[in-house]
Amino acid sequence: MESEHIKAGYNKTVGKAKEEIGEATNDRSLEAKGHAQQAKAKAQDAVGDAKDAVE
């Protein structure tokens, strides 16, 4: 497993937690940060997939 996939898994998990905490506490800023972190995770997964395809 590439390090990009590991980073993506971390960012997906933390981003989801931030999103849910933001929703629960009505903190729109934290919720938005969670969405952004999850988007970053998708990009990291794509980079990891591309690296895997090259290898």
Image (tube, rainbow, N blue to C red):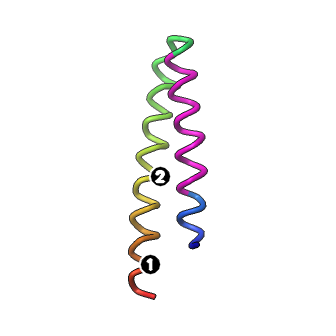
Query: Label 2 is placed on what type of residue?
Result: Ala
Q: Residues within 10 Å of mark 2 (few under 14, many from 20)?
A: many
Q: Residue 41 carries which label?
A: 2
Mark pair 2, 1: CA separation: 15 Å
Q: Nearer the viewer, residue 3 or 30?
A: 3
Q: In this view, does 30 lie above or below 15?
A: above
Q: Residue furthest front?
A: 1
Q: Which mark is residue 23?
A: none
What residue does disc 1 label? 51
Image coordinates of residue 41 in percent, x first then y, are: 47, 52
Query: Label 1 is placed on what type of residue?
Result: Lys
Q: Which of 20 and 33 is in front in this view?
A: 20
Is residue 21 magenta-colored?
Answer: yes
Q: Earlier in the sequence, mark 2 or mark 1?
A: 2
* Residue drawn at 56 percent across, 48 percent down: 11
Q: Give the range drawn in magenta.
A: 8-23
Disc 1, SS: helix
Disc 2, SS: helix
Q: In this view, does 13 lie above or below 8?
A: above
Q: In this view, does 10 lie above or below 29?
A: below
